[in-house]
Amino acid sequence: MAEKVYNSALYRFAVATNWMTVLLLIVGALVTSNQAGDSVPDWPLAYGKLIPPLVGGVRFEYTHRVVAGVVAVMTLLLAVWIAAAEPRRQVRRMGWNALALVVAQAVLGGVRVLERDPGLLAILHAILAQLFFIVLVGLALFLSPWWQRDLPKLEDTGSPRAVTVTGWTTFVIFVQLILGACFRHGALSIMPHLAGACAVTVFVIWAGRVVKSRFRSVPELRRATIWLHATFGTQILLGIAAYWGIRYVTDAMHPSVVYVALTVAHVLVGALVLASSVLLTLSCYRMTPPARSTVRDSASLPHRTADASGKAGL
């Protein structure tokens, strides 16, 4: 049975790696918001030293490197641990993919420093960070006790299926984060980002309506939907506040504390919106298999079905 492969220590370590990655996203946003991306001209050392003088923007850039190093080591340990203890091939592959992404992210960050290119490489660095984060989020869910126990198989007779709608929502959110990175690094104006926000709003509302109308009585999917709506609502408010902060400091010599706090929070919550959508999509995938899988499983397992009204029964 699925419960036999559950490893509580491995799951907790995967969750800890996710939280350390959240800290890395915060520190990375601090580097950008404090305009400290070019504070250290060399890599992997800093001014030719292991620990440089921690003054000015060097504090943010060096802290970013240290936290990134910790995340890289934790990801290496996680991948090796998964390879040794996890019988599912797909999960082992995801562990190695996470390691490949963190290595690529480190190399890309180093090239960005050495080439001193604040544009394209910085945007690619931000995009890769989001990809790495959602892979880790997926890994933690796959290693969780919830994913590995026998769950009721729910029928999704609607069209399009909930997993399709939530999957597209995740994709649109990811594209919106790319547009946000382009805006922060000066590659695009704010208009594409605002258009992306409108598109995300439509898809988040659509995904929520689909899941709630079909699976209102399923607590796992209901909670995941609430998390998506809560993080997205917070992100909208932070986006408005961050835009005000940008206009407020346009003529300032140095970024204000308010500006830095708002922009960092906006970047962080954007990543949490993406993570919430990934969790909702994977939860729908886990609990609403295709019709053929549901019929096949029904021969051996009692299961709960949900009709279009969202009522579930035995």
Image (tube, grey):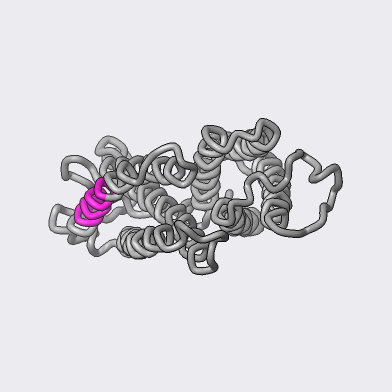
Part of the protein shown in magenta: 198-210
Looking at the rendering, in which quadrant would you find the C terminus?
Answer: bottom left
Residue at 53 percent of width and 47 percent of height:
133
Q: Position of residue 136 (x, y in %)?
A: 55, 47
Q: Quadrant of residue 171?
A: top left
Q: What secondary structure characterizes most of the magenta part?
A: helix
> Between residues 115 and 148, which one lies in front from this camera angle?
115
> Between residues 34 and 288, which one lies in front from this camera angle?
34
Say whether residue 300 is visible: no
Residue at 51 percent of width and 57 percent of height:
145
Q: From what the image shows, is residue 61 above or below residue 236?
A: above
Q: Quadrant of residue 160?
A: top left
Q: Quadrant of residue 220?
A: bottom left
Left or right placement of residue 305 versus residue 255 in this view? left
Q: Position of residue 69 (x, y in %)?
A: 72, 48
Magenta region includes residue 204: yes
Q: From what the image shows, is residue 118 above or below residue 229?
A: above
Say whether residue 148 is visible: yes
Magenta region includes residue 283: no
Residue at 66 percent of width and 44 percent of height:
38
Total tally of numbered discs in the picture: 0
Q: Position of residue 141 (x, y in %)?
A: 49, 52
Q: Position of residue 297 (x, y in %)?
A: 33, 43
Q: Residue furthest bottom?
A: 258
